[in-house]
Amino acid sequence: MADQPPTKCEPTTAIVRFACSALLISEPIGRYRRFAESYHVRDSSPTKELSCMRYALRPVRQLYGSLPVNEFGPLALKAVQQHLIDQGLCRTHINARINRMKRFFKWAVSEELVPSSIYEALRTVPGLRFGRTTAREKEPVRPVSEEAVDATLSFLSPQVAAMGDGASIANSRSESLCQRYKCNSSQNNQDAEDDRRPRSGAELPCPTSQRRPVVRHKGIREFHSLARESKT
């Protein structure tokens, strides 16, 4: 029988643990930083998530940077969580940072820098729950007063001022109005393109009564002023 070519040996869990025992936590953090700088990029510019990951991993490096990575467990993560509480961060912000720390360890497992048991153990650490922690709550976002809106509209272009009035009437965000305008503009352009496209004899134009009507608002600012007069 011919000799079979040697097969490539896959690293076992014991080998991974042995390699991780010599790594300090600061080393995988440095490798992840280089990965994140090339991953969290949009239009050749770093995204906001890159800075968020840096802030999230900073206390881990400061408190446990010299600790072997295979010794970082749930108690260490809870200590980092308490450290963020002592710094005065709000509850939701702390939960977001803890989740990013877990995501870092998940990446480290995929790179065989951390045993999978470490990540599975860190997943058992729950987030801070409302009313069951000493962490402060984030201040609620209050609506802008109508006086501030009226004072701002005079400095805006007619298009932006109309969007501001529409947002206050529809009780929606500006992003939602932009998306609706983009969808309506795309549909109107498609309808105009269909009308200009040459048609064959078998393809007859749709009757005018069956076409989608194009709604043109008369003036949202006038409607807004009437709505305010009706309140008074």
Image (tube, rainbow, N blue to C red):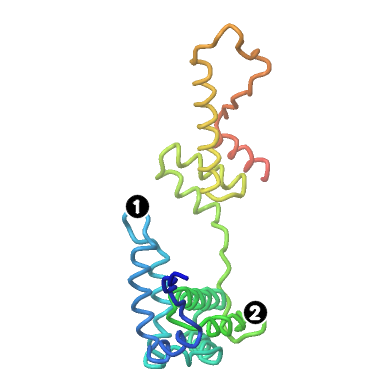
Mark 2 residue type: Arg
Task: State the residue in front, 65 or 98.
Answer: 65
Mark 1 crowd level (few <14, some 14–19, many ≥20, 10 Å Cα)? few
Which residue sits furthest top?
201
Q: Tell me: residue 225, above or below residue 189.
A: below
Q: Tell me: residue 227, above or below residue 36.
A: above
Q: Earlier in the sequence, mark 1 or mark 2?
A: 1
Query: Distance between the Cα atoms at labels 1 and 2?
Result: 37 Å
Task: State the residue in front, 35 or 48.
Answer: 35
Instruction: Mark 1 and mark 2 in contact? Answer it, CB < 8 Å.
Output: no
85 displayed left or right of 169:
left
Give the residue at mark 2. 129
Q: Residue at x 49, y 54 (%)?
A: 148
Q: Tell me: residue 219, above or below residue 45.
A: above
Q: Quadrant of the C terminus?
A: top right
Residue 6, position in %: x, y? 42, 74
Residue 150, position in %: x, y? 50, 47
Mark 1 residue type: Asp
Q: Residue at x 60, y 79 (%)?
A: 127
> Is disc 2 placed on a helix, strand or loop?
loop
> Is disc 1 placed on a helix, strand or loop?
loop
Residue 26, position in %: x, y? 36, 85
Q: Tell me: residue 189, above or below residue 91.
A: above
What numbered label is drawn on residue 134? none
Give the residue at mark 1. 43
